[in-house]
Structure formats: structure tokens, C-alpha cells
Image: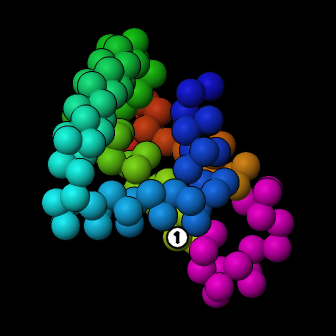
């Protein structure tokens, strides 16, 4: 599924993911290549609109919790960023013996998070 591939992409290569994030922040801060940043943000905005529509449809179908779509989007973002940080943490790297199994576990819970009925309401 799309969600599974998103999490795998974000979690499987945390150094590259964090590098892109730092590079974007640096480019924005230094106001370098503003036309490319604007183009990136337009693409991101279009993706956000599309993702919001998908989430709204899943909520209407009764598959996802009926909360604002931004809750679902930010939860996925937080899981992906937290997982990337864990994969780069020397402390946690010592504790997580089977990295591939851990990534599979995160992906499995990531694609189910936000499913209707998980809030206990």
C-alpha cells in the first residue's frame, strides 16, 4: 500500500532523509534558490491537498478515526521522523538487535494507526 511504502521510504534510509530535511531548512534560512523552494512548496501543497482528500474519503468510509485530517497527517509525520531519529541513535541502535524486524513492526503499526476504533471512543 501507499502508506507502507511511505513509511519504508522514510524509515529505511534515515541519513538521507535527515540530510534532505537539513538541506531544505538551510536553503530556506539562507534564502538560496527561492524559485526552487517555491516550486517545492507548491508540489508539497498539492500533495497535501490530495492526501487530505484521501484521508477525508477514508473517514467517510468509516475506516479512519473521525478527526481533522491534519491529525492523521501529523501522526504519520511524527512516526516517520521519530523512527528516523531512532535509527540514527547510538543508544537505541545498541538495544534494537534486528533492525529489519523493527522497521517492519513500525511500518505495520504505522499503516494501522488512526484506524477507526483505536481511540476507545
x and y percentages locating residue 25 in the rendered image: 29, 63
Q: Which residue is denoted by mark 1 in the rendering?
A: 85
Mark 1 Cα-neighbour bin, 10 Å: few <14, some 14–19, many ≥20: some
Between residue 56 and residue 82, name the one nearer to us. Answer: 82
Q: In the figure, 72 relative to 20: above or below?
A: above
Query: What residue span does the magenta drawing correspond to?
Result: 87-102
Secondary structure under badge 1? helix
Q: Do we see residue 26 in this rendering?
A: yes
Examine the structure image and report whether residue 96 is included in the region drawn in magenta: yes
Residue drawn 62% across the image and 35% down it: 5
Between residue 83 and residue 38, name the one nearer to us. Answer: 38
Q: Do we see residue 59 in this rendering?
A: no
Between residue 66 and residue 100, name the one nearer to us. Answer: 100
Residue 78 placement, left or right of 41? right
Residue 78 placement, left or right of 69? right
x and y percentages locating residue 78 in the rendered image: 40, 56
Residue drawn 62% across the image and 36% down it: 4
Amino acid at each position: 500500500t501507499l502508506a507502507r511504502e511511505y513509511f519504508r521510504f522514510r524509515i529505511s534510509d534515515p541519513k538521507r532523509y535527515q540530510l534532505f530535511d537539513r538541506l531544505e531548512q538551510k536553503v530556506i534560512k539562507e534564502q538560496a534558490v527561492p524559485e526552487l523552494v517555491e516550486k517545492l512548496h507548491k508540489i508539497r501543497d498539492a500533495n497535501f491537498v490530495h492526501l487530505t482528500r484521501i484521508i477525508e474519503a477514508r473517514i467517510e468510509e468509516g475506516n479512519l478515526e473521525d478527526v481533522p485530517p491534519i491529525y492523521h497527517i501529523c501522526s504519520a509525520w511524527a512516526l516517520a521522523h521519530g523512527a528516523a531519529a531512532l535509527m540514527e541513535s547510538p543508544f537505541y541502535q545498541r538495544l534494537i538487535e534486528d533492525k529489519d524486524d523493527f522497521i517492519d513492526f513500525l511500518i505495520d503499526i504505522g499503516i494501522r494507526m488512526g484506524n477507526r476504533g483505536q481511540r476507545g471512543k
